[in-house]
């Protein structure tokens, strides 16, 4: 997996890192138990402050995507573990609330129910790879599409410290 950050983007760097790691988990590029690079290593390879990477990892931990194991580092969490069931229910309720707010905003702008459902379905297809489905019984990873443009990046390979840059 290659992480790309854009120093000029409006989105904060820690959220760029967070979003890309979540995307890699969803696509099966990062799997439960896999180690992430150390905070120092990733920060150095991306050319950013280590506190930025630390914040991204902390947010991922708080959201249940990553487990922190002291000096061993950060690891991708298993969403199917029983102790994660409560977190999953909380996140599901949060997603439903956010979808409701989006639907209300769409309706307030004059949008129809059908338009909203069509857009939501298109984005779900985009997230799940147009028909692929990943769940706790087995992931079906899809190939990731590359992004164009100059950005700093790091290749993440199970915390092995193998990194690269693109420009």
Image: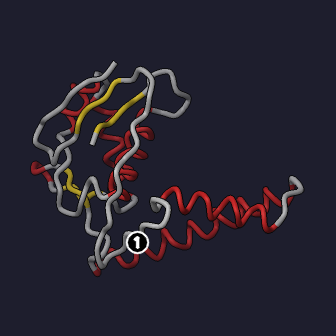
Residue on which the image places disc 1: 87
Compared to residue 167, the image places residue 139 above or below, namely: below
Q: Is residue 74 left or right of residue 5?
A: left
Tell me the quarter of the image containing the N terminus. Answer: top left
Tell me the quarter of the image containing the C terminus. Answer: top left
Q: Residue at x 40, y 77 (%)?
A: 86
Q: Residue at x 33, y 56 (%)?
A: 25
Disc 1, SS: helix
Residue 91: image location, x then y, percent? 48, 68
Residue 159: image location, x then y, percent? 14, 44
Q: Residue at x 31, y 33 (%)?
A: 51
Of residues 160 and 131, the one nearer the viewer is: 131
Which image quadrant is residue 129 in? bottom left
Compared to residue 51, the image places residue 69 above or below, namely: below
Which image quadrant is residue 150 in? top left
| Circle 1 Cα neighbour tier, 10 Å, few/some/many (<14 / 14–19 / ≥20) | some
Residue 161: image location, x then y, percent? 12, 36
């Amino acid at each position: 997996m290659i992480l790309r950050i854009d120093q000029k983007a409006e989105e904060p760097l820690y959220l760029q890192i967070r979003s890309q790691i979540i995307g890699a988990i969803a696509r099966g590029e990062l799997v439960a138990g896999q180690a992430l690079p150390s905070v120092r290593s990733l920060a150095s390879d991306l050319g950013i402050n280590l506190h930025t990477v630390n914040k991204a990892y902390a947010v991922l931990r708080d959201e249940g995507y990553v487990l922190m194991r002291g000096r061993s580092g950060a690891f991708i969490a298993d969403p199917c573990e029983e102790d994660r069931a409560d977190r999953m229910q909380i996140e599901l309720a949060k997603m439903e609330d956010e979808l409701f707010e989006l639907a209300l905003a769409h309706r307030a702008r004059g949008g129809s129910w059908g338009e909203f459902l069509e857009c939501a379905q298109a984005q779900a297809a985009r997230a799940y790879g147009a028909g692929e489905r990943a769940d706790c019984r087995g992931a079906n990873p899809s190939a990731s599409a590359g992004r164009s443009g100059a950005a700093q990046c790091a290749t993440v390979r199970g915390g092995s410290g193998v990194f690269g840059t693109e420009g």
